[in-house]
Image (tube, rainbow, N blue to C red):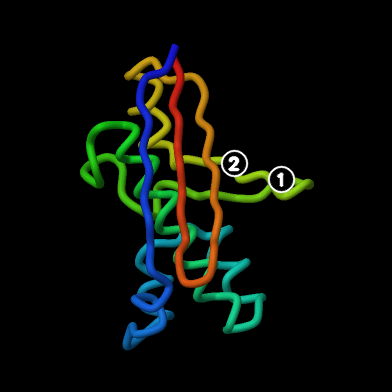
Amino acid sequence: MIYGIGTDLVDIVRIKKMKSLSTFANKILGADELQQYNEQDEELNYSYLGKQFAGKEAFVKALGSGFKKPVFPKDIQILRNSVGKPEVLLSEAAQSHVDDLGITKSHVSLADESNYLIAFAVLET
C-alpha cells in the first residue's frame, strides 16, 4: 500500500550560482555520496548535487514531514546500484523513524533534461 509520494524539481542554474559548492555538498550529502561527489569531474557535480537534493526533498515530501528531526538531508543517501538504479540508504535514526511509520519499501527516480533535474519518490507500507 502506498504511504506517500513526493516530487521535486531543481533548476541546475541555482546550483551553478552557489558561492560554495563544497559547502552545500558537505551540508546535504552523506559519507558515501560525498565520496562519489569528490571523485567526479566538477561539471558533473552540478547535476549530481541537484539530483541528490531533489531526491532527498522528494523522499521527505513522501514522508509528509519535510526535513525535521530525525530526518535531515545527510540522513538520506541516494546511491546507485550496479545497474544505476537509485536506492535509498537511511541513517540509523531516520531508518528507525521510517520503521515506526510502517514504511517497508522506498522507490526513487531521478531524471534530468537541459537545466532541470527532477526526482520522484514513493514510499510503501
Q: Give how far across and how far down residue 65 sits, in percent.
A: 22, 36
Q: Residue furthest right?
A: 82
The residue that appears at 47% across and 67% down in the rendered structure is: 49
The residue that appears at 33% across and 28% down in the rendered structure is: 97
Residue 81's label in the rendered image is 1
Q: Is residue 54 above or below residue 86?
A: below
Q: Give how far across and how far down residue 88 sits, in percent.
A: 53, 41
Q: Which quarter of the image is occupied by the N terminus?
A: top left
Nearest the viewer among 65 and 32 is: 65
Q: Residue furthest top?
A: 1
Pointer 1 or 2: first along the chain: 1
The residue that appears at 67% across and 44% down in the rendered structure is: 85
Mark 1 vs 2: CB contact within 8 A: yes
Residue 13's label in the rendered image is none
As drawn, is 123 to the left or to the right of 64? right
**Badge 1 element:** loop
Tell me the amino acid under the disc marked 2: Glu
Q: Which residue is mark 2?
A: 87
Tell me the amino acid under the disc marked 1: Asn
As drawn, is 110 to the left or to the right of 124? right
Label 1 Cα crowd, 10 Å radius (few <14 / some 14-19 / many 20+)? few
Q: Write down the quadrant of residue 87 in the picture.
A: top right
Q: Give how far across and how far down residue 79 sits, in percent.
A: 60, 50
Nearest the viewer among 58 and 35 is: 58
Label 2 Cα crowd, 10 Å radius (few <14 / some 14-19 / many 20+)? some
